[in-house]
Amino acid sequence: MSESGKPLFSDIKEEVRSLGGELTEMATLRWQLAQAELRSDLMAARCLAVRLAIVAVMALTSLPLLAVCLAELLDGWLGISRTGWLLILALGLLAGAIPIGIWTWCRFRRRFTGMQESLEELREDIVWLKEWTGRSDDACQ
């Protein structure tokens, strides 16, 4: 029997220490990624809220104008020029609000990531842990 002077479980201790360091670093990096994605998503949601509020103000402003136009039109066509301008202004506001609202929604959906990268990284980490521990998918369920 040869004695090398190394404790019996020194290799295992080193492996566990190495794994602990890697897991700590991995968790720290994942946390930083999640925070960055959440900040980005919150900024996108804030921009959406501001733009939708502007669209709502434009649309709500046009509704009384449309009501005045309808009332004047039903009142025997008194003052056609005024009614015409009210109708043009109301339809102009609506024509501006609708495409701006659609554009804002599409832009938000295009930029919103919903933490896709963090979830993908977590999936990769699970696969890595399974490979490192030698477990199969059946053993983890």
Image (cartoon, rainbow, N blue to C red):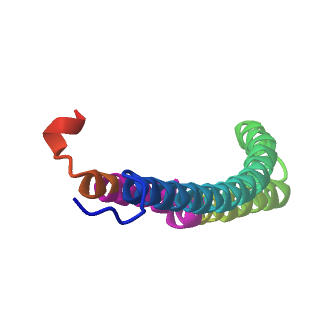
Residue furthest out toward the front:
1
What is the total number of numbered labels drawn onto the structure image?
0
Percent from the top left, x then y, of residue 63? Answer: 74, 42
Quadrant the C terminus occupies: top left
Is 117 covered by the magenta stretch?
yes
Q: In terms of depth relative to the viewer, which is nearer, 59 or 134?
A: 134
Quadrant the N terminus occupies: bottom left
Q: Residue at x 71, y 37 (%)?
A: 74
Majority secondary structure of magenta residues = helix
Percent from the top left, x then y, of residue 122? Answer: 42, 54
Q: Above or below — where is 70 with respect to 86?
A: above
Q: Residue at x 33, y 62 (%)?
A: 3
Q: Which residues are magenta?
A: 105-128
Is residue 114 shown left or right of residue 55? left
Q: In terms of depth relative to the viewer, which is nearer, 78 or 53?
A: 53
Q: In terms of depth relative to the viewer, which is nearer, 118 or 55?
A: 118
Residue 77 in view here: no
Percent from the top left, x then y, of residue 111? Answer: 56, 66
